[in-house]
Amino acid sequence: MKKLTLLILLAIAPARAADFQPAPPPADVQEALIAALKNGRNTAAMVEYIDAIATVPFSSDIYEISFKGGNNEILYVSKDGGYIFQADIIAVPDALNISRERRDALAAAKGLANTADPAPAAKSADDPPAKPGKKAGDGQFAALASELALKETKGDGKRRLWIMTAPDCSMCKTLEEQIGSISDVTLYRYLYTHDDSSTQRAIAITCHHNPNEALRDYLLYGLASEDKPDEACATAAADKLRRIREETGSSADRAELPVLFFPDGEETRVLAADGDELDRWITMHQAAKTDSDKTEDKRDDTPAAAPDNATPATASDTNDSDPAPTDSEKTAPLDASQPPQPPASEAPAAPATETPAAPGSDNRPPAVQVLRPQ
């Protein structure tokens, strides 16, 4: 099953897109589509969360999928079930965002917040982008204050990713396997719990001397520390878990986990195929740099000036000094307006040629696992 993230611009004629009314596809088409999704890679579990399959105004070979519960997400699927599209569909004549209109209609029907509502301001530089329309307890998994998360810095930590996860989440194990190969990222993991057993396990993980390692060990290997957390830590951890549950709401379905939140506001319940693709996603969805960020990066890259009292090194100062050039090796001073030229004795390198990838090689984009939307 493949996922394409794109913006589709469509000219719809003769009917206006705003006048289109979604309808179920013929029964035989719907049955064939469900059967194809059940046989897809990691899409069988998704089928039970499908609420409706509907026609779209621009094609008889693509359908809209909406999901049950407190979720107004929609996906598009090809008629044969071979491709899933996560996209915004724009009708050119009407300048109408069909996808946004449908999400708003679903949200209204389910009593969810309007996504057009302004997003609250982030309280901390570590906080993820606030989600427009998110209200406490509305059943949506949305980015929360970073103080509620387990923070882990890998490498230089310049990139960022926020994750809603849980100790008893099977697909969260797959995500942890992918994260193992990724560096240079700061991770914020929120633990979602739904009963006393999962809450006690999350408290034990949070109060471990290395909580992120404890979560990985439990998800990947089923290893759990038997040490009882001290009362103060257990109380503080229980309060954080309660706040996460209250913010998310009791109608949230943990079967949707994990949920990933990126600095540019992207949110997805779709897992990458492997660690390399997840690494590309993290880079692609970092927030655009501000002018002050660019200035800071430029300052970091500028070599430090030599001190005023520094004296030039002589040949006796190092054994690695190059001998002085002979008259035949000396060249004229470079003209700053001209690009540097190679020595005449060096022949220009032959242009590199690309060898086409053999059929069936691994140079194609990997498939994407689609995970349990509502």
Image (cartoon, rainbow, N blue to C red):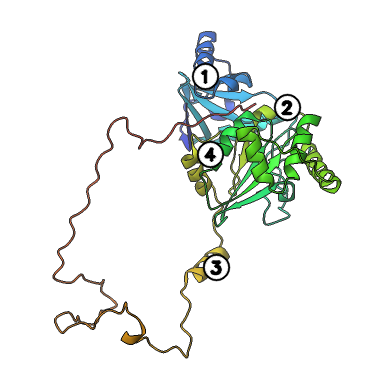
Considering only order in the chain, which callout, 4 or 1, is on the residue closer to the N terminus?
1
Q: Is residue 168 left or right of residue 271?
A: right
Badge 3: residue crowd in 10 Å (few <14, some 14–19, many ≥20): few
Badge 4: residue crowd in 10 Å (few <14, some 14–19, many ≥20): some
Instruction: Tell me the kind of residue under disc 3.
Output: Glu
Q: CA distance from mark 2 to mark 4?
A: 34 Å
Which residue does the numbered mark 2 point to in the structure image?
A: 110
At numbered mark 3, what does the secondary structure look like: helix, strand or loop?
Answer: helix
Q: CA distance from mark 1 to mark 4?
A: 24 Å
Which of labels 1 and 2 is toward the front? 1
Considering only order in the chain, which callout, 2 or 1, is on the residue closer to the N terminus?
1
At numbered mark 2, what does the secondary structure look like: helix, strand or loop?
Answer: helix
Instruction: Tell me the kind of residue under disc 4.
Output: Gln
Which residue does the numbered mark 3 point to in the structure image?
A: 296
Work out which residue is located at the far top of the displayed protein and give it.
28
Please give the count of numbered marks on the rendered protein: 4
Which residue does the numbered mark 4 point to in the structure image?
A: 178
Q: CA distance from mark 1 to mark 2?
A: 25 Å
Q: CA distance from mark 3 to mark 1?
A: 48 Å
